[in-house]
Image (cartoon, helix red, strand yellow):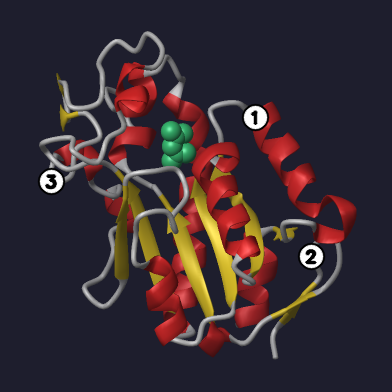
Amino acid sequence: MPRVAARPFEFFFEPASTALVLIDMQRDFLEKGGFGETLGNDVSHLRSAIAPARALLEACRSAEMTIVHTREGHAPDLADCPPAKRSRGKPTLRIGDRGPMGRVLVRGEPGHDIIPELAPRDSEIVIDKPGKGAFYATALGEILRLRRITHLLVAGVTTEVCVQTTMREANDRGYECLLVEDATASYFPEFKRAAIEMIVAQGGIVGWVMPSAAVIAALG
Ligand code: C5J
């Protein structure tokens, strides 16, 4: 069984019962003109996660693991977008408004796509989610149950929002979750650091953390 020297202690996983969950590596978060930038963020902070996430994805593909990609977004009529989410703050464009990559955070628009470097294969699972957590209002839990998945390798953006929310949801559902630390990023590097410390504190109260190279070596 692959074992990795993670924090706060060793993590063991069987590839057959482990899924890679890549959170929201979408143009809307990583590229200029998308949702992330409309909120006033410097999207360049997220790019550091792309190469490690790509290497991790390739290693998990080679190990024939279950691979899940998530996308945050809403139906074109915004019926699944809480008014509070749309009206909050002072973005330059609101969810559903037309921007340089189509309607912001709307399914089917160019901005909603996963970045080309991490494009899902036909055999991989894509979960469209209206919220921050990947279990809320999606079939993810049922899909993982049918595949007898017990462990999750988690990566993607942003660390303290959709990644951490998903890890907390998964942890409460009994999954053993490991965050791949260089394959996740935040618009606020200090929030990434803090989220990682929250996850591993108190004996791994939310889960484990380790770099992609260690996971890839364990899979190899
Ligand atoms: C945010 C996400 N930050 N994917 N979404 O709104 O983390």
In this view, the residue in front, 3 or 38, is: 38
On screen, residue 188 above or below 6: above
Q: CA distance from mark 1 to mark 3?
A: 30 Å
The part of the image, by quadrant, that contains residue 210 is: bottom right
On screen, residue 217 above or below 180: below
Task: Give the x, y percent position of residue 62.
Answer: 44, 82
User: Which residue is pictured at 64% across the width and 29% down the height?
Assistant: 189
Q: Amino acid at mark 2?
A: Ala
User: Which residue is pictured at 32% across the width and 60% down the height?
Assistant: 127
Which is more N-terminal, label 3 or label 1? 3
In the picture of the structure, the residue carrying the numbered disc 2 is 6
Of badges 3 and 2, nearer the viewer stands 3
In the picture of the structure, the residue carrying the numbered disc 3 is 108
In this view, the residue in front, 79 or 40, is: 79
Quadrant for the C terminus in the image:
bottom right
Q: Considering the numbered disc 1 on the image, is that residue within a helix, a strand or a loop?
A: helix
The part of the image, by quadrant, that contains residue 135 is: bottom left
In the picture of the structure, the residue carrying the numbered disc 1 is 189
Task: Give the x, y percent position of residue 18.
Answer: 55, 79
Q: Considering the numbered disc 3 on the image, is that residue within a helix, a strand or a loop?
A: loop
Task: Give the x, y percent position of residue 196.
Answer: 73, 45
Q: Amino acid at mark 1?
A: Pro
| Mark 2 residue's CB less than 8 Å from ligand 1 | no
Quick check: 125 left or right of 48?
A: left
Quick check: 175 left or right of 147?
A: right
In this view, the residue in front, 128 or 34, is: 128
Q: CA distance from mark 1 to mark 2?
A: 21 Å
